Image (cartoon, rainbow, N blue to C red):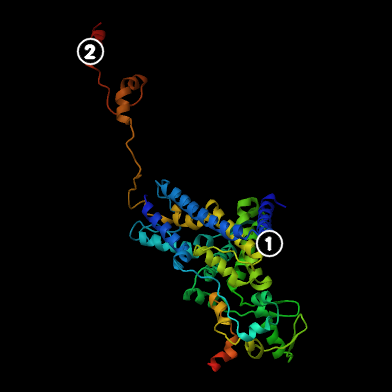
């Protein structure tokens, strides 16, 4: 049997699939998105926890907040520096970060993450517009 | 204890610490985040082509399909079209079933002695089940990772993520909190299946007997990849935007190695690079080899058609007729049977006459 042409065709198809990310992104530069901070957020300087922690683990923090509010009716969060916050996505987080499209969505879209926060919570920034 | 799996385990542990210490302590982020991944991809592509073209050059002079059913012969005997395919279409169906459903593995049997000395064969399905789970979950995991290599993320990747993350498992206790970001089933299935395949080799004595370090190493390596991946996603956490900017830098040829992604990430990436570079030179090439297996991809028409070796070239032959012509006289003298009777040349005839008259 001399099936060299079929074998080469197979290799070409495989390499085309393997190289999908290379040709799909050809000529595009996709740097990490920069989140936009509102004036209020800039003025506060630090979030409820350090920025590094918030970047990687904010979803865990929100999970704990939800649990404590819904199950235990606790509404006060004391952070590592002893500051007290009201545990509320809509009233605390999004009070500073009122720009959902430029703050939350930018990274979530970039990383293809689809959180279910806004299934229930309102995006106040739309009301303001 | 067995030195084969200890060597493999040790190799994977050393590789982990090389990347972890290299990136975390010495800050060699460019080496582990850019240079090694690029090198690995180059080695993978070149090695892959080299291997497959080597196979393409190899002679397959004979039809050697394994028949798993009745061959087509007389019209009143029912042939098995898929397991003994006699047309290209049937071979294509056989190959698709082999590649997608692992039918050869499905036939796996286990031999044992029962009731003292009765040799018995039993159908053993678990290897097939876990091999299927392993390969498909690995495929889904690889496809899911395309979200880090494409911008914008194509809809089919997002769809796959939705399906994969269908079960929302969130664990929240004082001691352990996990499940955010959403749990992907494929990663857990991959880890479970690779653990099964590894334990199968380590715990079954007959499997351990035929296993070498090259059998354990890919299993430990893939275990390491799945483990570090799950660790990063659900437990230690990394800044995923930074990870994506590194991945996007690689595929757009604007490489960056941002800060904020820890040693575990570089160990994960290093493991994947090692797997890619190791791939063409290992048993993992069954990925390409399954398509080129002559026991599966040839038609079983050995009775219908005469197959001549396509590489036949003129060979100096000495046929039996020529042989007999050369040695007929001696054969007759020795009393050996000959096809053509020995005709004596004229001069010897006259000698004989002279002898008889004497």
Query: Image point 75% across, 82% down: which residue?
Result: A79
The answer to which of marks 1 and 2 sits earlier in the sequence is 1
Along the horizontal axis of the image, is B55 left or right of A97?
Answer: left
Query: Image point 25% across, 18% down: which residue?
Result: B344
Residue B338 appears in view: no
Along the horizontal axis of the image, is B304 left or right of A21?
Answer: left
Under tag 2, what secondary structure?
helix
Q: Residue furthest top?
A: B358
Residue A11 appears in view: yes
Instruction: Indicate whether A82 appears above or below B206.
Output: below
The residue tagged 1 is B24
Residue B249: mark: none
Residue at mark 1 to residue at mark 2: CA–CA distance: 102 Å
Instruction: Indicate whether B312 appears above or below B100.
Output: above
Locate residue B258, reporting x and y percent. Answer: 60, 66
Q: Quadrant of residue A117?
A: bottom right
Few, some or many C-alpha atoms within 10 Å of disc 2 (few <14, some 14-19, many ≥20)? few
Locate residue A105, reporting x and y percent. Answer: 55, 81
Q: Quadrant of residue B245?
A: bottom right
Question: Which chain's residue wears label 2?
Answer: B
Locate residue A72, reporting x and y percent. Answer: 74, 90
The residue tagged 2 is B347
In-front residue for pair B166/B104: B166
């Amino acid at each position: 049997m001399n099936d060299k042409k079929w074998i080469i065709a197979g290799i070409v198809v495989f390499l085309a699939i393997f190289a999908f990310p290379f040709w799909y992104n050809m000529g595009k530069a996709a740097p990490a998105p920069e989140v936009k901070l509102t004036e209020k957020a800039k003025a506060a300087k630090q979030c409820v926890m350090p920025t590094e922690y918030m970047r990687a683990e904010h979803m865990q923090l929100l999970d704990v907040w939800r649990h404590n509010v819904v199950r235990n009716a606790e509404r006060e969060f004391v952070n590592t520096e002893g500051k007290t916050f009201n545990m509320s996505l809509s009233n605390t987080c999004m009070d500073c970060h009122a720009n959902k499209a430029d703050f939350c969505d930018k990274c979530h879209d970039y990383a293809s993450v689809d959180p279910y926060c806004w299934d229930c919570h309102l995006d106040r920034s739309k009301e303001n517009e | 204890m067995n030195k084969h799996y200890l060597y493999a385990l040790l190799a994977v542990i050393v590789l982990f610490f090389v990347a972890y210490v290299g990136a975390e302590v010495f800050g060699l982020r460019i080496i582990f985040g850019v240079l090694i991944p690029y090198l690995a991809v180059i080695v993978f592509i070149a090695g892959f082509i080299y291997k497959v073209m080597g196979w393409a050059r190899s002679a397959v002079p004979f039809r050697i399909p394994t028949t798993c059913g009745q061959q087509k012969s007389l019209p009143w005997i029912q042939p098995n079209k898929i397991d003994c395919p006699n047309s290209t279409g049937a071979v294509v169906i056989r190959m698709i079933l082999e590649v997608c459903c692992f039918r050869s593995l499905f036939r796996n049997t286990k031999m044992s002695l029962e009731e003292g000395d009765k040799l018995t064969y039993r159908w053993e399905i678990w290897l097939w089940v876990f091999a299927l789970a392993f390969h498909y979950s690995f495929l889904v995991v690889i496809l899911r990772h395309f979200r880090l290599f494409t911008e914008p993320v194509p809809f089919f990747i997002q769809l796959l993520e939705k399906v994969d993350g269908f079960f929302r498992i969130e664990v929240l206790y004082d001691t352990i909190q996990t499940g955010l970001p959403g749990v992907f089933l494929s990663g857990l299935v991959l880890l479970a299946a690779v653990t099964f395949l590894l334990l199968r080799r380590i715990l079954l004595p007959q499997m351990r007997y035929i296993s070498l370090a090259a059998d354990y190493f890919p299993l430990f390596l893939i275990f390491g990849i799945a483990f570090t991946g799950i660790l990063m996603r659900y437990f230690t956490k990394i800044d995923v935007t930074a990870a994506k900017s590194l991945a996007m830098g690689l595929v757009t040829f604007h490489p960056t190695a941002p800060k904020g992604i820890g040693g575990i990430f570089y160990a994960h990436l290093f493991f994947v690079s090692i797997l890619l570079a190791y791939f063409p030179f290992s048993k993992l090439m069954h990925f390409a080899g399954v398509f080129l297996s002559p026991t599966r991809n040839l038609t079983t028409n050995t009775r219908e058609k005469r197959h001549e070796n396509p590489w036949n070239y003129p060979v100096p032959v000495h046929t039996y007729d020529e042989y007999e012509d050369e040695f007929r006289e001696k054969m007759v003298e020795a009393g050996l049977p000959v096809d053509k009777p020995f005709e004596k040349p004229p001069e010897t005839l006259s000698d004989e006459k002279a002898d008889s008259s004497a």
